[in-house]
Image: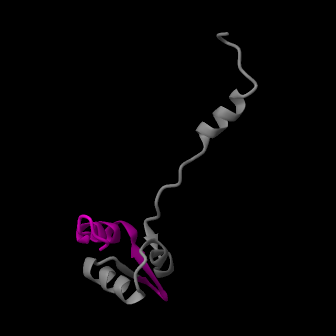
Amino acid sequence: MTGMQSEYDYFRDKKDRVKKKEPKKWIRYKEALEIYPVSRKTLEKWARDCGAIHRIEDSILLDAELLENYVESKKVPGGVW
């Protein structure tokens, strides 16, 4: 059946065309607290230690990639942080 399309090909093609979301570059504290289940004080310390804090006027944003790399470097094998 070369050259012929099934009635289900439309859905298969549509599924393949769905764009994957890329991870955010900048996140707020609230979003970071959803990702990392720690207290806000601990999160602030981590962000300060790795230099991930960026202040833009009244907003405070965290560099998600820097924070992720910092947290990964602090993980203990077989442990929780």
Q: Identify which residue is drawn at 67% across, 10% down.
A: 1
Q: Residue furthest front?
A: 78
In reply to whether residue 27 is colored magenta, the answer given is: no
Q: Residue furthest right?
A: 7
Judge by depth and name the residue closer to the eye, 62 or 38.
38
Residue 12 vertical position relative to residue 31 in the rendered view, above or below? above
Q: Identify which residue is drawn at 27% across, 77% down.
A: 50
The location of residue 75, given as percent across then percent down, is: 26, 69
Side (left or right) of 12 relative to 67 = right
Q: Quadrant of residue 52?
A: bottom left
Magenta residues span 55-81
Locate the C terminus by quadrant. bottom left
Q: Identify which residue is drawn at 38% across, 80% down.
A: 54
The location of residue 21, given as percent across then percent down, is: 53, 54
Q: How is the image coloured?
A: one colour
The location of residue 29, given as percent across then percent down, is: 46, 81
Side (left or right) of 41 relative to 10 = left
Side (left or right) of 43 relative to 8 = left
